[in-house]
Image (cartoon, rainbow, N blue to C red):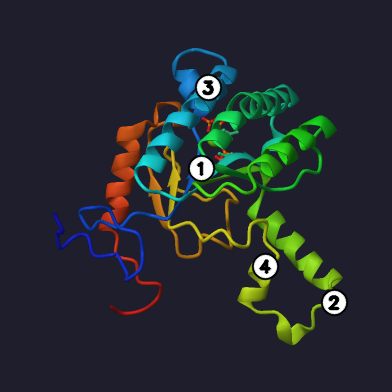
């Protein structure tokens, strides 16, 4: 049923069978793994393991709901400040996920992309990321963007450096040109940013791209964030009125 509440579907944008707006791009700050484990008197590691196990069901549900692009914040440039043991564990977990999930994602026509820098990552790890990205580069289904060793400020600084290195004349620098220097220029901006774990902050995620994203925060920790929680977030999104600075 089309209700008065669901009025954020500008012409040409995705909507479901009921006329409700569907975000084309959902970005998720997967937070709360440590607290999830703590609440169970388990080591933080177990929270990360459970969080990793949750990725597949959430992606599948988003795909089923008609979402075309999903970006997951997996490791920030600031997360290097954590104890070395936790950092190594997180690296190892991501490598395990690449090994166990990429073939299936490829079969499902999913394009995997990486947002962030490969600097500081072990050489074999870098190759594994590059291989996953290369293998799926021609896939035309959903895009799954993994923000790993990603920082929004870092992305912007790197863009500025490359613009300068290219000798771009000052008068050519505008928002459209700047975007071309981001990690994934052709990826549309996120329509919806979901943060699990209860905080209301962006923590250096997609600073440029989230200028007009709708923000949704839930106290649910990432390992517990299931399909019903995805639905709640999508329902909340459908009720938002996006104005982009204009008056309706
Ligand atoms: C998110 O969970 C995963 C990463 C940041 C890698 P946290 O590890 O931040 O969990 P909390 O916030 O301590 O509960
Ligand atoms: C954000 O979570 C980063 C990821 C989910 C990868 P953090 O746990 O690092 O964020 P803060 O420290 O609470 O801001
Ligand atoms: Mg956290």
Q: Does the rendering let one see residue 168?
A: yes
Who's the residue at 27% across and 53% down the image? Answer: 16
What label sits on residue 180 in the rendered view?
Answer: 4
Q: Please rate how many residues cluster around mark 1, counting C-alpha atoms within 10 Å: few if below 14, some from 14 to 19, many from 20.
A: many
In terms of depth relative to the viewer, which is nearer, 236 or 177? Answer: 177
| C-alpha separation, residue under disc 4 versus residue under disc 2 | 15 Å
Q: Earlier in the sequence, mark 3 or mark 4?
A: 3
The quarter of the picture where the C terminus appears is: bottom left
Who's the residue at 33% across and 45% down the image? Answer: 233
| Label 1 lies in ligand 2 vicinity (Cβ under 8 Å) | yes
Q: Earlier in the sequence, mark 2 or mark 1?
A: 1
The residue wearing badge 3 is: 47
User: Can you give x and y, in whole percent of width and height, for residue 169 in the image?
Assistant: 79, 83
- From what the image shows, is residue 224 above or below residue 74? above
The residue wearing badge 1 is: 29
Element at label 4 = loop
| C-alpha separation, residue under disc 3 versus residue under disc 4 | 36 Å
| C-alpha separation, residue under disc 4 versus residue under disc 1 | 24 Å
- From what the image shows, is residue 134 above or below residue 46? below
The residue wearing badge 2 is: 167
Who's the residue at 86% across and 69% down the image? Answer: 165
Residue 130 is drawn in which quadrant?
Answer: top right
Q: Nearer the viewer, mark 2 or mark 3?
A: 2
| C-alpha separation, residue under disc 1 versus residue under disc 3 | 15 Å
Q: Residue furthest top?
A: 41
- From what the image shows, is residue 9 above or below residue 44? below
Element at label 3 = helix
User: Can you give x and y, in whole percent of width and height, for residue 28 in the image?
Assistant: 48, 44
Q: Please rate how many residues cluster around mark 2, counting C-alpha atoms within 10 Å: few if below 14, some from 14 to 19, many from 20.
A: few
Instruction: Tell me whether the residue at label 1 lies in contact with that at label 3, contact meaning CB atoms closer than 8 angstroms.
Output: no
């Amino acid at each position: 049923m089309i209700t008065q509440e669901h009025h954020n579907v500008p012409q040409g944008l995705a909507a479901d069978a009921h006329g409700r707006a569907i975000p084309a791009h959902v970005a998720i700050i997967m937070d709360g793994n440590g607290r999830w484990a703590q609440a169970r008197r388990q080591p933080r590691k177990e929270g990360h393991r459970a969080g990793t196990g949750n990725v597949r069901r959430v992606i599948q549900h988003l795909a089923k709901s008609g979402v075309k692009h999903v970006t997951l914040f997996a490791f920030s440039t600031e997360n290097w400040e954590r104890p070395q043991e936790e950092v190594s564990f997180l690296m190892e977990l991501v490598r395990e996920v690449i090994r166990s999930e990429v073939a299936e994602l490829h079969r499902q026509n999913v394009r995997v992309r990486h947002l962030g820098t490969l600097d500081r990552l072990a050489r074999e790890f870098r190759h594994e990321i590059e291989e996953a990205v290369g293998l799926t580069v021609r896939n035309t289904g959903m895009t799954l963007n993994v923000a790993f060793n990603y920082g929004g400020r870092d992305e912007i600084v790197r863009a500025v450096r490359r613009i300068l290195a290219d000798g771009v004349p000052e008068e050519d620098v505008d928002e459209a040109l700047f975007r071309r220097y981001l990690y994934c220029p052709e990826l549309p901006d996120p329509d919806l940013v979901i943060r699990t774990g209860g905080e209301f902050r962006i923590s250096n995620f997609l600073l440029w791209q989230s200028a007009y994203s709708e923000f949704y925060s839930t106290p649910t920790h990432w390992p517990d964030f299931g399909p019903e929680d995805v639905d709640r977030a999508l329902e909340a999104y459908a009720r938002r009125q996006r104005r982009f600075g204009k008056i309706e």
